[in-house]
Amino acid sequence: MKVLSLNFLTCAVKACKSTTGSYPLHPKDAELVEDNLEVNSELLLNIMPRIDWPALSTTATELGFPSLPAQPPTKEELEADEKMLRDLHHLLMETQMMEGKLVCGNCGHEYAVREGIANFLLPAHLV
Amino acid sequence: MSRPEDTLSADVHYDDTEARKYTTSSRIQNIQASMTHRALELLDLPSPSLILDVGCGSGLSGEILSSLSPEEGGPHVWIGMDVSASMLDVALQRDVEGDLLLADIGQECPSAPEHSMPPSASARSNGCAMPRNNEQKKMITGAAVKAGFGAGLLEDDPDTKNAKLYLVLTVGAAVVDGKSGDITGVVQGMEGVDVMDARNRGKAGSGEIKKGSKAWIVKKKEQMERKGKVVKATSKYTGRKRRVAF
């Protein structure tokens, strides 16, 4: 599962949705794999406005990446700075979480990740 | 057409053998491919985007999303959700590029709410639905409108057993480049699409027919005729007042 997807996930428990602690989910015992993908600059520019930057910073730090700048780069900055684009591509697209757990900061529920697939099916008592 | 959901829920029905059968069937592959291309045509994405495939199954549609050439606006990056672990297992073996999630859209979904909305000021999303009858169609579009979307249905090959129904949801700007922001704008310029806009209908003719008028009498006569009663023929004298005798 890409770090990009992590930026779009929150806890599936209904009571957690409205709390701030449930987003982003915190990776635990994460086993990361790196892929080599071609940089798709257009795509990155397209999705930048949709990315929750503070959440991405949190995830990146928890996964052991060097900390990100406090402010998200603007479109112009990204277009001008190829290294920044490459770094962002590396973090969002190429880094994959294969095994581990995603933990909700609010209820503490752990979602297992196996072979890159996160299991968001809830046990019956949480539905 | 038999529907698997009539007998079992999707996560039970699509076990390992069913998932493999589904994915390797060339008929299903063809249908999925044509529906994906149609959906992309409706979405009209100019550049690579992030797409959520709800009910991605073994990633048949996702494969097409990843394989689009830059001229066609691709390749898109996608996240797939499905309730059947076996389907996702097949997707894994097929080495699809999108991210997969095991989740039930009937339960709560794990997508972060502020992200679920499409990105730009005017945006659309679409899905392929399988409603059984008109009532279900109404229910689906009604729910979409309640949730704040503009909803419209596009039906391919209507009145055949291959009928395919696409639900087109639109958000935002009312008019974009001279096209209206709802489904009629989306299908504008597409070949062979008839627009049947129920919003325009009914303004002219739906007013109650006045009791005692000629139209009312004719309607009543038709009703009686349908019941099998003997009814006098309708002529220019029908419904006229008699001349005053004195």
Image (cartoon, coloured by chain):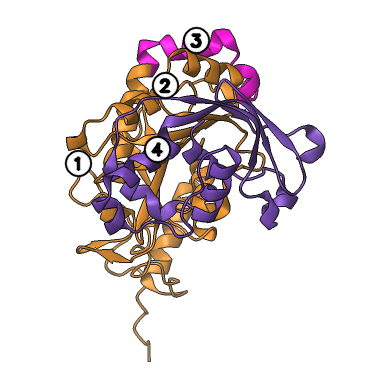
Q: Chain of mark 1?
A: B
* CB under 8 Å between discs 4 and 3: no
Q: Nearer the viewer, residue A96 or B77?
A: A96
In the rendered view, does B163 fall on the left or right side of A118? left
In the rendered view, does B34 fall on the left or right side of B86? left
Residue at which label 1 appears: B192
Taking B16 as reference, is A14 above or below it?
below
Q: Residue furthest front?
A: A66
Which circle marks residue B96 in the picture?
2
**Which residue is located at x 62 percent, y 34 percent?**
B104
Residue at which label 3 appears: B20
Give the residues drawn in magenta, as a range.
Answer: B7-28
Amino acid type at circle 1 is Gly
Q: Work out whether residue A1 can be spotted.
A: yes
For the residues labelled 2 and 1, the Cα–Cα distance comes to 34 Å
Q: Colour of chain B?
A: orange
Residue at which label 4 appears: B165
Q: Chain of mark 4?
A: B
For the residues labelled 4 and 1, the Cα–Cα distance comes to 15 Å
| Labels 4, 1: one chain | yes
Number of residues whose C-alpha sits closer than 10 Å to that of mark 1, classed few (under 14), some (14–19) or many (20 or more)? few
